[in-house]
Image (cartoon, rainbow, N blue to C red):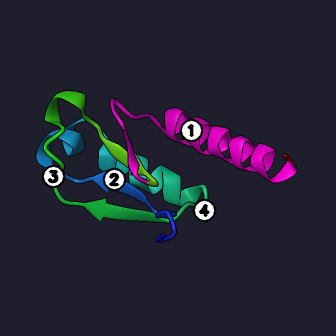
Amino acid sequence: MPAPRTAIGVCYGPRCSDFGSREMAEELKQLGLEVEALDCQSLCPHAPAIRVTDRFIHRATVERVTGYLAQKAQESQAKKQA
């Protein structure tokens, strides 16, 4: 089984860019997160779209992305303790 993606993918398509995806990518980089630019993901009605591991966050904000990462870290820690 391949390892899950660790990078955060940010859609750089026109609609997502209009809704601030490029600025969010810079903010996420400043937080020390690995960010990769994605071509248009055809999720325009849900812009901006950001991929975390293998899941997309629609109408993403930096807070939603970091919250999702924190939630996944807690779940991972709980599995290790079980």
Q: Residue furthest right?
A: 81
Span of residues in magenta: 54-81
For disc 2, the marked residue is: 10
Q: CA distance from mark 1 to mark 2?
A: 15 Å
Q: Residues within 10 Å of mark 4 (few under 14, many from 20)?
A: few
* Mark closest to the chain's N terminus, 1 or 2: 2
Q: Nearer the viewer, mark 4 or mark 1?
A: 1
Amino acid of disc 1: Tyr
For disc 4, the marked residue is: 32
The answer to if 80 sits in the magenta stretch is yes
* Mark closest to the chain's N terminus, 3 or 1: 3
Q: For the residue labelled by badge 4, is the local secondary structure a helix, a strand or a loop?
A: loop
Q: Which mark is residue 11?
A: none
Q: CA distance from mark 4 to mark 3?
A: 24 Å
Q: For the residue labelled by badge 2, is the local secondary structure a helix, a strand or a loop?
A: strand
Eyeballing the image, is 36 above or below 43?
below
Q: CA distance from mark 2 to mark 4?
A: 15 Å
* Mark closest to the chain's N terminus, 4 or 3: 4
Q: Residue at x 76, y 47 (%)?
A: 79
